[in-house]
Amino acid sequence: MKGCFFKLIILFTFLVAIVFYVYEYHGDEIWDWGTDKLVEYAMTRVKENVEDLDASEYKDSLKVLVSDQFDKVKQMEWEKISDQTRAFFEKTEQFIEDNVIDSDEFKELKETIKEK
């Protein structure tokens, strides 16, 4: 029983050392990869939700607006993504919950982007 405990302690120590090593020497690469995957996932999810909207005169405009915002986000560093950009995507998710985008909602989204 004592042997198992010591093996577990040694294994745990090695795992912690590996995690620290990877974080120290490859943390930036892993962070960049993770944020890229997160942005891709969010982009796919929002675009699918926009595609599922009922047909309206603002649906295509919303597609373009969302696509432009994602292009801007891809070029930014993670830390520099503004509250304005986050607010835009939160409002977009909120507005497409009812499966229709109307002129007031679209106008509010455009104003959210313009605010600086």
Image (cartoon, helix red, strand yellow):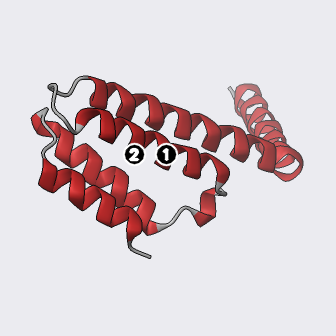
Question: Which quarter of the rendering shows the C terminus?
Answer: bottom left
Name the residue located 83 percent from the left edge and 42 percent from the top edge. Answer: 22
From the viewer's perspective, is residue 81 above or below residue 15?
Answer: below
In three-dimensional space, the C-alpha distance between marks 1 and 2, rounded to whole angstroms, equals: 5 Å
Circle 2: element type: helix
Q: Amino acid at mark 1?
A: Asp
Looking at this view, is 108 or 18 the one in front? 108
Q: Going by the image, does 47 lie left or right of 23? A: left
Q: Residue at the location (39% across, 62% down)?
A: 113
Work out whether residue 17 can be spotted.
no
User: In the rendered image, which residue does mark 2 sit on?
Assistant: 65
Q: Quadrant of the N terminus?
A: top right
Please tell me in which quadrant of the rendered image residue 16 appears: top right
Residue under label 1? 68
- Viewer-closest of 108 and 27: 108
* For residue 114, side relative to residue 52 (left or right): right
Q: Residue at x 39, y 45 (%)?
A: 65
